Image: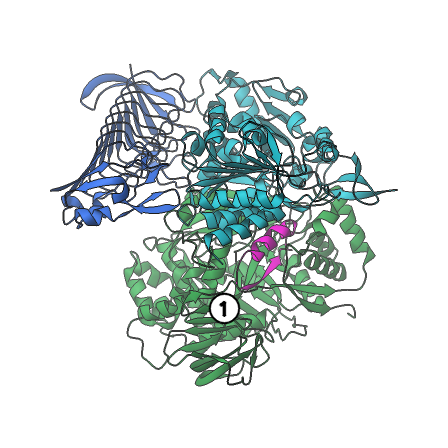
Chain colours: A green, B blue, C cyan
Amino acid sequence: MSEYIIKNGNVFDPVQGIKGDKADVAIKDGKIVDKVGSGAKVIDAKGKTVMAGAVEIHAHIAGPKINMGRIYRPEDKLFTCTPTKGIERMGGGASIPTTFKTGYEYAKMGYTTAMEAAMPPLFSRHVHEEIRDTPIIDEGAYPVFGNNWFVLEYLKNQEIENTAAYCAWLLRVTKGYAIKLVNPGGTEAWAWGLNCLSVNDPVPYFDITPAEIIKGLIEANEYLGLPHSMHIHPNNLGNPGCYETTLDTLKLAEGYKAKNKFGREQVMHLTHSQFHSYGGTNWGDFESKAKEITDYVNKNKNITIDTGNVTLDETTTMTADGPFEHHLTGLNNLKWANIDVEVETGSGVVPYIYSPSISVCAIQWAIGLEIALMMKDPMRCYITTDHPNAGPFTRYPRVIKWLMSAKAREAQINAFKHKDKVLSQSSIGTLDREISLYELAQMTRAGPAKSLGLSGMCGGLKPGMDADVAVYNFNPDKPVANPEEIEKAFSRCAHVFKSGVEVITNGEIVSNGNKRTLWVNAKVKDNPQVMRDINEKFLKYYSMTQANYEALGHHFVPNPYALEVDATQV
Amino acid sequence: METVTITMKNLPALYLEADNISPDAFAGKTAAQIGDLHVYEGNETWTLGKYFEVSGNAGATAADTKIIVKGDIKKVKYLGFKMSAGELVVEGSTDQYAGGWMTGGKMLVKGNVDAFAGTAMKGGELTIEGNAGNYLGAAYRGDWRGMKGGKILVKGNAGADIGMYMLGGEMVINGNVDVHVCTHAEGGKVIIKGNAKTKIGGQMVGGDIFVFGTIDVMMPGFKPAGELELEVDGIKAKFAHYIGDTGERHKKKKGQIVYGNLYKKI
Amino acid sequence: MTKTITDVICPFCGTLCDDVEVVVSDDGKQLLEVYNACVIGTEKFLHSQSKDRVTRPRMHQPDGSWKEVSYDEAVEYSAQMLAKAKKPLMFGWSSTNCEAQSVGNEIAEITRACCDNTAATCHGTSLIAIQDIGLPSCTLGEIKNRADRVIFWGCNPAHAHPRHMSRYSIFPRGFFTSKGQMSRKMIVVDPRVTDTAKMADVHLQVEQGKDYELLDALRVAFKGEWLPDVVAGIPKEKIREVADMMKSGRFGIIFFGMGVTQSLGKNHNIDEAIAVTKDLNEYTKFSIMPMRGHYNVTGSGEVFGWQFGFPYSVDLTRGFARYNPGDTSTIDLLIRGEIDAMFTIGSDPGAHFPISAVKQFAHIPSVCVDPHLTPTTGVSKLHVPVAFNGVEVGGNCYRMDNVPIDCRKVVEPPEGMLTDEQFLIKVRDRVRQLKGVA
């Protein structure tokens, strides 16, 4: 059965500009089509909301630090595991779900594509094993470059072509998707217990600044013409006053134009911007600078951002910003894991409780929502929780509720122990905007897909695109009596299709799908110098041979989908 | 108070997991309904009635319910699991997790218990007339939040790793204990009337431990802080006071550093 | 004629050397020579060529003799055993690959079994400590390139991980350590004067069973607090000297092994060692790493972790995963008579478990999947020999620092032999039929 017709749903598709029209969506052989035959299976979507499958642009769901989180937090699974149910494998993990649970929970919320936010290249085999074991959803992974010795050395000498050649090689051998920077320079400094807290702090020994790394990787990214822009977690995350470092980082994108064949228009994607929008000088006068950040991004159209919303849960933080995690364990004294990776990067893991009775946590909650509400272009602002850092991704329906209902926000504000401080240190109390369903579709489907260079493939319901479709039990024609209905409707789809295969029917998982691993195959001119440099570093500084580093056989990536990039003529 | 008596009549081939033997699970049920509650033997789900004879109906609420467990229950785990009120009397020795995750009520075991008794206890009273195994009143694996409240009394000896990550509540051991007492504790009170061995109060940042008997070797992180007369559990005696674990990072309360306290009877 | 295969990964210990070279016959059927591996690794490769290898399954007969059976009969016995049992246990996994582990996990899930790996007798206590306090660590290349303080606590790499010191921890000239071993100070903590201890700049002969106290004393010394005159047999002056030596480095690493994971206190010893490491990060940069024994015990833990959420001692009997060593761990399950079927693979519990646990094999049906003849195969009802993982079949493995390396196949297994994965797939498919699941 490969023909379906989803009838009479209220369709929201920013790719075709459909704003809630009652329309049919036809599926055939894995794609959206104009029409199907009379033998097509009918899905009744009357009174329901129909959108393309959602696209997760940044979450930590597959790889060594995620698994360290799982292994070192048995209490994250106590009493909350779900049993095997037919074809559905057992699941567990409240803040760090097992791989099976990850696929199922995303699918239940209508997500069909997700990007692993940070892959340490040395561990690519691990990342891909977990991606392979995550059912249903297509995934890709971003290798990290911002603390990589090759990049630091080439950019110190301003060798963009060599940097680009190295990036292309690394993307290919790790089957990575994009150029990711995490705390550029700072995580290499952390290998000596130090950090780079501003864009001008030089990296010990390598003597290059984060600003130079950032600009160099923007240039390398555009030299190659990759589907996504460079994707950055700026320096100084999470500290009061960090918004200035964020503005310094954003300004480095000025003057650059996107060059690519994938429809991408930004040259920088700033991730989990909530964590980077803090004012004040200490935790006492901590305040929101969401306005300053969104003012800048609103004016500078070559930037996209995602929110990083705090969900007020007990969760687990994990990031390649190793020094930040050490700082965090110093603050909350909870168990700290750290993994420094030779030549390349580092990472850390620390549990964290965003308690509504703590004013800082409540203000952080407000900042994430302010950002979404103050960004004017929903095609450039995407909803995330930087899972699991600001909260588990399973809370997306709750975040959507807060964005779509001022009443729900008000109820949460009133429930805060330090309500007055939340209102004085942020402007959440002044914002009455409510995100519409069309804007939601822009912020969770069409927008992230476009930013990723996937706008031809997913994030929309235009004929020719992949048949990734979500049907929600939400009737846009009925006024919402209680905002909890929003959260409930977006928690479990009525139906979900992935690549034209029915994966959820009446809210239940009916197939494990046939997920693809998305990666970018960028070709450059032969570059003997870079290849020699690679050979040399493997001989001298890595603890693994080059041949074994490059080994990523079929059993790791059984269903690959390569986006081809030809940068040989640059 | 209504009393339900359950008597083991059919020994399991392996072990039984009886999370449903608690006043909370029985409340509002008749004997027949209680007999239909699930118990688990390995990967098989059976009813309580397969293994136990049930007589008496439960009270309307947990608080109104008393359970007496009789027969050979040495291979039954999780008796009293998560009980919040009422009474549970176990007439004999039982296995692991006795009174695990209790938040209230009274549980009495007229025999020994195995490991993990009183795990993550939040309230209530757990009395063990015989010996307790390892990890008495400890936190679950990985959780930094251990026993928060309630009272555990062991008339015999206890095993190793008691009171791990303890935050509050009280434990009294009339007999001896094995290694590792109150590791990582932040609060609470543990009284050991018999002898302790080694590794007492390791990594502790708060709470009080009283040892009436001998201590084989002190942790180096406990520094002498004088001697004092104290009345502990009704007994007046002189104790040497040690504070620690000085290897740890300690919090301050009103400008004073907060330590764990170890009192050894002189 | 012969051919040389390079970049071969040695499938013996957690050092997972990947620079081994193996010379094989042109037809790929004979393994002739091994270069670069240590004595143990070389033997691992060469002994696959023994002429007296068992190449077919065999069932233990009531009179104690063995009768050869087919792989199909072995599959049937194993599937029936696992499907019928109320609480089967699938143990071992540490000497096979992650792909096989994954199939084993499917079987365990369908049959609602317990599953466990050799961490249960080894670094399981490290995992418990990591779950309590975390793990500041790094990859082995970081040690090579940066470390100037190297501490071996309760381990003897000279014997147990022979190439560790030359590949990673003491001798290499790395990016910031161009003077090799001259760049480094080495401290060994061990009650015995081992071959590793003989190389050390400082050897602390700690009193047995007192590592926890000595580690606490180091932390007290870091903070400049009062110390008793002697702790664990070491005078306080020496303790302060070692504390200063650790603080004065610019990058330190503590490697530890069975001397602390399985001696008195177990997980608490590791917990305190990790606390020492965490404290040192207030002054300089320090990491800590367990010296994992089997070459893929780490990998087994990783696969259990991402599929079930726990690294070992996993109980699936209720249809979802539960974990609590002491309850769900293999030796306790055996000694307490909790299980009614034993499936061993890629390990040798018969040799390493307490005898009271091994005796339980006599009472229950048991299968042992292993190319060798071992004490475990000796007490099991069915012995299923398989191809040597990492020699006769490839597959992903994880090094002691969690780095994944895909082992290679260098030579053909004996005619008609199955690999672990192939055997397990057949068992899984049969179990599915027996249980009536998709």
In the displayed structure, does residue C36 sit left or right of residue A305?
A: right
The picture quadrant where one finds residue A29 is bottom right
The one of A111 and C213 positioned closer to us in this rendering: A111
- Residue C178 in percent (x, y) is at 74, 36
Residue displayed at 55% across by 48% down: C427
- Residue A109 in percent (x, y) is at 44, 66
The picture quadrant where one finds residue C370 is top right
- Start and end of the magenta stretch? A121-147
Label 1 element class:
strand
In the displayed structure, does residue B225 sit left or right of residue C362?
A: left
Query: Is residue A403 at all visible to an observer of this figure?
Result: yes
The one of A74 and A568 positioned closer to us in this rendering: A74
The vertical placement of A84 against C218, above or below, is below
Query: Is residue C183 at all visible to an observer of this figure?
Result: no
The picture quadrant where one finds residue A426 is bottom left
The vertical placement of C270 against C421, above or below, is above
- Residue A90 in percent (x, y) is at 45, 53
- Residue A147 in percent (x, y) is at 64, 52
User: Circle 1 is placed at which residue position?
Assistant: A382
The one of C130 and B243 positioned closer to us in this rendering: C130
